[in-house]
Image (spheres, rainbow, N blue to C red):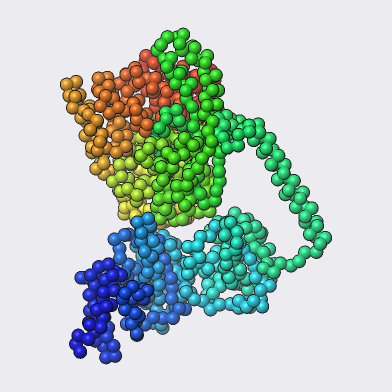
Amino acid sequence: SSKGPSSGFNQVRDLLKREFNRSVELQFLRTPSSFAFRAVSGPLIFTAMSVLNALRQPARGGPGPLPGLQPLYSVPDLRHQVHSVLQFVPGHVDVRLCNFSERVERGLLLAYAETRRRAHEQGNVTVQLLNITMGPRSAVNLKVPVDITFAVRDGRGFLTGSEVSQHLRRLSEVEFSFYLGYPALQIAEPFLYPELNTSHHLRSTWVRTVLLGVGDQLLTERSFRARLERRLALLLEEGLGESARRRWKRSTAVGNSSLQVVRIARLSGPERPLEVLYFVEGPGGARVPAEATAATLNRLDLQRAAIVLGHRMQRPLAQPVETVSVPPSETQSSSVWLIVGVVVPVLLALFIIVILYWKMCGSEKLEFQPDAINTIQQRQKLQAPSEPALAPNNPSSLQGHPSPPSVTRSRRAAGSRCGSMTRQTGRLVLVWGSLGSDHRERQVEGIGRGGGARKEVERAAPMAHATARQQHRKTAKKREIGPRSLVWSEKEFVDKAAFEFSETENMLKTAESLVGAVRVGASTTSWCCPPPSPTGAWRNPCLTFATPTLLAGDRSLSNVIAHEISHSWTGNLVTNKTWEHFWLNEGHTVYLERMIGRSMESEQFRQFKAMGGWKELQESVKTFGADNPLTNLVPSLQDVNPDDAFSSVPYEKGFALLYHLEELLGGPVVFMGFVKSYIQMFAYGSATTEEWKAYLFTYFQDKVDVLNKVDWNAWMHTPGMPPVKPQYDTTMADSCIALCSKWTKAGEADLGVFTAADLTTLSSHQVIEFLSLLLQEEPLPLTHVKRMQEAYDFNSCINAEIRARWLRLCVKSRWEEAVPKALQMATEQGRMKFTRPLFREVYNFDKFRDEAVRMFKTHRAAMHPVMLDLLSKDLKVDPTSC
């Protein structure tokens, strides 16, 4: 009857409503042999495969499988099917709808057409989507991969999956992502190849490699084996010195040979290693002996192999599955050489370590030793002074930052104190150190109270210092803050640090979604910071340092961690070739840091942070002088110590250039594609500005006319501020600007209108901006500053960024009571970002100029050499005469 179809499918409709979580109607079409229907929701149409996938879910009170239910179109067999994976799609996109599948289908067609154009092939092709699936989203994981299965056909019929894969893999991930409109995790892998002979009778030709750190999720990917096989083939290429040919079957061609993976299996062990068995066929199908294949691969460097495969591995890199027995005489000889060459040096090294440990740390195994690393020669890299930093809850724990970019010399970090450094594979470990400042507080109290009191404090300083060191020995504690993240600290600060950096894993995931997965070694890190170090934080592939001045109690400045995470790609994976090109490290890192902030917060937040960075750039240019060549983005460092050139210029001028290019070339999404491609292009290497610029023009070859309009000489080689000032969104800054204007225009009679309520709607970021704006104005009258303290109580603020700006503002307004507090903060931690401006403000206060110099000379022994050099120039003191 006419109502037969609809009554028979009522249960189907109800099931689809539950699965799709929206109203669904079925539209029917009678065909000669069957009923056809489609599922719609208003104007939206669901794809046939999404309906089938929903109906094939385990029954939950709905109907069982419907007999003969299949799509109207024909589905090719597995040898024609290809599998692509998107990293994620935005939360508002429903992959089950036809509008999404049409977009993907159109993108695949454009991508395939581009590869045929590059291969100079003619003819028309069509793309048929077979399935699109995505795992369930959750509140914790909103970005889940999307699997796409498709086939390609030309006038003769469907092409084999291996042929389609061979074409599409000529594109980079960035290019493929561009055509599909979403970031790609996997370009294209065929589902099926004709296999070589994998019989166990030929087991003697099999080779074994054991991988470490392979997650279970990777093993569930359908193309993992093919991808691993291709990477093993790349290693074999390097060993043989040959180039890969076209991949045409379930093996990967290498020169005149083919490599095929036979089996992948887990082994027992704490790291759950993964055993990979494979073999190589030579010309004409002749098997290459396992010993020959293993010897070829073992000639390669193990670190290089790990980079190519994307995983760590056990030694040896490759070994025959059926190992040939070794004669006893050879075994004995090998054992002797093993003892002589390995065991003896290891025992000697352990003996030396025990002696050093006993000398440096005494008998307390896990305690922080204040002077334990005084004699260690450090060779370190500077980090941005523009990074936000937070003060701890106890002023005595305010710390400095690590080292400089000097590549010409190693330096001794006098008076430094560092926690134990722990390396754990796949872990982000934060290690913090603190230093008591009781003796410093007592010294500051002597200011302005007569020479006798001052001299008495100075005589007591060495003893007070020694006492403080004894009182502040701390036992290291740790807290897990994520699957890859640990925080190490003294027990008094570990919980505060764990709270402050609890978003580390989200930052890591966000960064990976922007620029790809963390490469080998980049996720094994430690964090610590000796107090005299002059910067906020800096990162190495397996060791990152940071400072307790980041502890504000509200996570307001944890973007410093985002900055250090970003260095895993821009700085470690790709490095500036010389210090003239330092901006390539830091400009891109600041750009990526703010893109992480954009993803986790908003575009307005990114713009707001960029405005703050512009002000810091203005201050650096003012300090150096607008005509100083060291304010060039690419300065000439001939006969110049790179430490002397350090400022926010490479950070913020570099970011301003990248942001300017972003605006010219199509916005953040488009330009982020270039940044990711640049990282992939120069990965595991170094780059110069010229190479970066050449690649920029290559990547945006369709927009060369736009790039040619950029005044490159003014940006790169002209001192002062950039030639173009970005027009940032001022939404978050408007309230800061209004409050600043209100204070600068207020008269004596108007001061009563200011109350603590003025700051209740402002975030910590906005309070920092408010104070930064006031610092750019003429000094406030002393009555205004005192009223500000009464209303806002900035003296009790533990945020180091706020406190430093507030004290500078007070000294600038000639409030004498603020001078001791300013000098206390300047000397109890060693960050150039805080110490140099505070000392300069006190030095510019004529009444206390001598006091600033005296405090510098008193504390110079505890200052990092970089700080000592630069601060002596700020205060016009000869450091050798101190």
Q: Please give the count of numbered marks on the rendered protein.
A: 0
User: In the displayed image of the protein, which residue is found farthest to the left?
Assistant: 749
Residue 13, percent from left and from top: 26, 76
Q: Residue sitting at 58 percent across and 77 percent down? A: 196
Camera-side residue of 550 and 709 = 550
Residue 327, percent from left and from top: 80, 64
Q: Residue sitting at 25 percent across and 36 percent down? A: 760
Q: Residue sitting at 39 percent across and 19 percent down? A: 820
Camera-side residue of 872 and 824 = 824
Q: Is residue 87 left or right of residue 32?
A: right
Where 212 sits versus 749, above or below? below
Camera-side residue of 711 and 5 = 5
Camera-side residue of 567 and 635 = 567
Where 676 sits versus 473, above or below? below
Q: Is residue 455 visible?
A: yes
Which quarter of the picture shows residue 24?
bottom left
Where 389 sits versus 247, above or below? above
Where 69 sits versus 82, above or below? below
Residue 704, percent from left and from top: 36, 54
Q: Is residue 385 visible?
A: no
The N terminus, quarter of image = bottom left
User: In the displayed image of the protein, which residue is found farthest to the bottom?
Assistant: 32
Which quarter of the picture shows residue 26?
bottom left
